[in-house]
Amino acid sequence: MKSSEFLTTEQLAQRWQMGESTLNHWRKAQCGPSFTRIGARVLYKLADVEQYEQANTTILGDK
């Protein structure tokens, strides 16, 4: 998958093994990864998802 590709809410929920409703709640609460709304569709740029994952990764034992 190229960095310019997008994930749907369903695809991101599957990637993170969580419910779509959690992502819907996060969007309303203005937290979570950046997203793009095109009409009624919500899309997440893969590069933004990867950046969010990196920023929220905790490495145990790292000081």
Image (tube, rainbow, N blue to C red):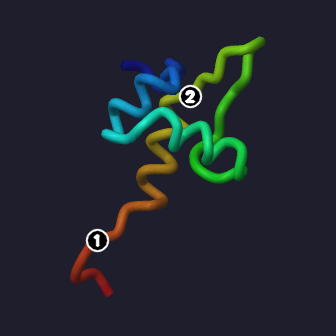
Q: Is residue 27 left or right of residue 10?
A: right
Query: Looking at the picture, does residue 49 appear above or below residue 4?
Result: below
* Badge 2 density bin: few <14, some 14–19, many ≥20, Cα 10 Å: some
Q: Residue at x 41, y 33 (%)?
A: 13
Amino acid under label 1?
Ile
Return the mark for residue 49: none
Give SS at disc 2: strand
Outermost residue toward the right in this view: 39
Which of these two is toward me, 19 or 3?
Answer: 19
Residue 6 at x, y percent in the picture: 52, 20
**Residue carrying label 1:** 59
Alpha carbons under labels 2 and 1: distance apart: 25 Å
Q: Quadrant of the N terminus?
A: top left
In percent of width and height, residue 58 lies at 34, 69
Q: Quadrant of residue 62?
A: bottom left
Q: Is residue 27 found left or right of 39 in the rendered image?
A: left
Q: How many marks?
A: 2
Neighbor class of circle 1 (other Cα within 10 Å; few <14, some 14-19, many 20+) is few
State the image coordinates of residue 31 (x, y, percent, origin top left). 64, 53
- Side (left or right) of 33 relative to 20: right
Report the residue marked by disc 2: 45
Q: Is residue 45 above or below residue 54?
A: above
Q: Residue furthest top?
A: 39
